[in-house]
Image: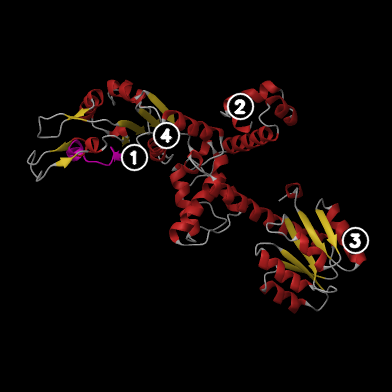
Amino acid sequence: MHENNFEGMQVLLVEDDAVVRKGARQSLELAGLQVTAVATAEEALPYLVPEFAGILLSDIKLPGMDGLKLLDIAVAQDASLPVILVTGHGDVSMAVGAMRRGAYDFIEKPFSADLLVEVCRRALDKRHLVLENMNLRRQLEQRVGIEARIVGRSAAMAKVRQLVLNLAPKSADIIILGETGTGKELIARCLHDFSERRDHPFVAINCGALPESIFESELFGHEEGAFTGAQRQRIGKIEYANGGTLFLDEIESMPLALQVKLLRVLQERQVERLGSNKLICVNFRVIAAAKEDLNVLAEQGKFRPDLYYRLNVASLTLPALRNRREDIPLLFEFFVLQAALRYGQPAALVSGELIASLMAQRWAGNVRELHNVADRFVLGLLDDTLSPAGCREASLAEQVDTFEISIIEEALRRHNGNVIDAAASLNIPKKTLYDKLKRFDISTEQFR
């Protein structure tokens, strides 16, 4: 990590020898690090607050409280705080004992300025990562409502959350479009849970997983004796969804013959069980999900146009994970916390190297695939530096786009969504920035 990334972080230096203290401080400050220097352990204690934004660098031999006692106090208060101890020549065994007690590293006197800076930078890098993870977890724990369900900082997901909140109270049927693993059922459940139908059933049926021979019975139900094997009455999914929501996943897989019957039910809001002549009134909302554009399929004769138009009162398209890579760190940490709770495992820290590796993947399986990788990480089945198996790396153009999006969003965040100020800070014409906002579908509203 470059030293510029240590902004707001400091090295708390404890050294009773004024000459050594001054030399160490100068070496660190010349390297661009912020230093607070004190002569005793007692003076250092007030700085060691929980989540102290920095590291502790202390001589072991001090007047009054020694460095080992200071180590014990610091580690007891925050076990993740990196503590670097400075030892005299021949005190290596003492330093090794300190490492067992929780010290991050030790430096033996006399030491070079380069070694001091290198060790401190490494410790600051680790501390920065720990604090970032703590902050991320706190953000996740504090999320409520729609943000706790639909996770992501990107403009694309902010738009999805807003659409869900806008559409949920309406009675209109909805089509959700998105690749496999983008979270179509999650969005459907949110549309249900944030609607007035929330206290009634949410009934999900995967149209691509049901054999055609039992599809009609599953959807419409049947009476006893309606066909061979129908030994008792069965309430169909549509009837069971009365008052609630019927979610039809992979609706493009529904046989054309059944599409005609579904259309009639949607138009009349009445269902007739197989083997019955009685029409049963049903009040339900349909949310259909598809991997492919139903309008295109309708034009190709693979989906009934009249059913498409009946369903497409409102539509919602979910972005692929590769098109919102800035959400990967937050999503991965979210899934890691969930997996840790589910498996009764500690939620391990997510390293910068692993996040960089995850950010570079293609994610053909989208969020679902990322979720599986998080599970493997918690279970210790994923090497911290390895790319998930079966994932191809993103192209150079995709990685450049991801980097550019992150730079633009950071500039907008600093300038509270003001495009003119953000363009000036990026040293580009405002028209260029507006063009990029349109190209990357970045909304300035989320930064205001």
Pointer 1 residue: 199
Residue 202 lies in the magenta-colored region: yes
Nearer-the-camera pick, 365 or 197: 197
| Residue annotated with mark 3 | 22
Which amino acid, by three-letter code, is at mark 3? Lys
Badge 3 marks a residue whose secondary structure is: helix
Q: Earlier in the sequence, mark 4 or mark 3?
A: 3
Residue 433 visible, this orientation:
yes
For the record, the magenta segment spans: 199-217
Query: Dot 1 surroundings within 10 Å: few (below 14), some, or many (20 or more)?
Result: few
Mark pair 3, 1: CA separation: 68 Å
Looking at the rendered structure, the kind of residue marked 1 is Asp
Q: Are marks 2 and 1 in contact (CB under 8 Å)?
A: no
**205 lies above or below 57:** above
Side of 238 relative to 28 (left or right): left
Q: Residues within 10 Å of mark 4 (few under 14, many from 20)?
A: some
Earlier along the polypeptide chain: callout 2 or callout 1? 1
Which mark is nearer the camera, 3 or 1? 1
In the displayed structure, 309 sits above or below 150; it is: above
Q: Earlier in the sequence, mark 2 or mark 4?
A: 4
Checking the image for residue 253, the label placed there is none
- Say which amino acid is labelled 2: Leu
Asked whether the beta carbons under mark 4 and mark 3 sit within 8 Å of each other, the answer is no
Q: Secondary structure at mark 2?
A: helix
Q: Which residue is mark 4?
A: 178
Q: Position of residue 260 (x, y in %)?
A: 21, 25
Q: Is residue 360 visible?
A: no
